[in-house]
Image (cartoon, rainbow, N blue to C red):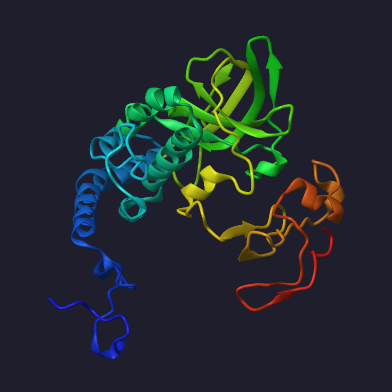
Amino acid sequence: MPPKNADSNLDSEAFLWDDPLLLEDQLDEEEVALCRAMRAFGAESLLPRIVEAARNERFDREIVAELGARGYLGSTIDGCGCAPGNYVAYGLIARELERIDSSYRTVLSVQSSLVMHPIHRFGTDEQKAKYLPKLAKGEWIGCFGLTEPNSGSDPASLNTRARPAPGGLILSATMSWISHPPAADVLIVWAKTDDDIIRGFILERGMAGLSTPKIEGKLSMRACTTGLIVMDEVFGADNYLGTIVWQRRFDPRNTARHISADHDYLIVFAKDARICEFNQMPRTEAMIASYSNPDDDPRGPWRRGDLAARNPYSLGRYPITTPSGRVIEGPPSGS
């Protein structure tokens, strides 16, 4: 069958609703085979389970083991027990999981990008050898702790602190709306140390002071479990990731968004009450923040002058042209 032409007259060729951009025509034989295998796995193994799982808000950790057994976890990582793969394979696997339900794609993204990637990139050799093979096989499940009740998922506003203690560090904080903590064996938690540097910490289920209550009654993503990470004087001696990770960007989250490490652009979102813009801009441009009444913000009044200090992307450079063509001359009123 000859390849389809995306530029041909739509009147002369049927519209392919399941592949409107003709993605599969651009894949090589191995990638097509991966798509077909993943699609068959989804139809035979995942589709029969999703209705009941979503209806009853049930997370099936066996799905993680099945993904691991097929080599679908950590496909962008070389070695460490991970099957050979690349970013194209990762995207194709995510596409087929999303075809069934976004909950299953979340399982893949959290495990591969938010847990395995930071261990592989920033962890010590001992940490890689201990955690990555079991995470790759789906024997262990991981979660990623960043989101806080008062500051959301903004690393620059992170309140969680790692305090020095004899022989190690102590973590005391609560993180909320985290994917997978009720089922997680390994928890990657982010906190600021006394030098105001954000570091990652590897926690394990069973550590004294660590609990992971489930959030019940979600209206969506019901087939993946969501909860809190509660740390009450959790002590760690050698559990921090070996490299400082907060520099110009927060690397693990960018990897989860399928953005390469050398990207030129970031998707930047408004931070709080009134979402004023979704914009794609160079990473040196301004981040837009807007509050209906800054004096009512529980974190204290926000002023234009301290935006840059609180977020490295907030450099106050205007005007900004949005994708729709609207020009923003300065910060929204009330910011």
Instruction: Please state, as top left, top right, bottom left or bottom right, where the N terminus lies in the image.
Output: bottom left
Tell whether 146 sits left or right of 328.
Answer: left
Is 137 in front, or is 172? Answer: 137
> What residue lies at 26% left-to-right and 66% top-to-bottom?
24
On the image, the x and y values in percent for residue 230 come to: 60, 24
Tell whether 146 sits left or right of 258.
Answer: right
| Count of numbered circles in the view | 0
Is 26 in front, or is 92? Answer: 26
On the image, the x and y values in percent for residue 270 come to: 68, 57
Instruction: Please state, as top left, top right, bottom left or bottom right, where the C terminus lies in the image.
Output: bottom right
The residue most toward the top is 166
> What residue lies at 31% left-to-right and 51% top-to-bottom?
93
Is 112 in front, or is 172? Answer: 112
> What residue lies at 72% left-to-right and 54% top-to-bottom?
273
- Asked where in the image residue 72 lies, by quadrant, the reply is top left
Above or below, 63 relative to 229:
below
Above or below, 14 relative to 93:
below
On the image, the x and y values in percent for residue 201 come to: 56, 27
- Asked where in the image residue 9 lies, by quadrant, the reply is bottom left
> What residue lies at 54% left-to-right and 45% top-to-bottom?
251
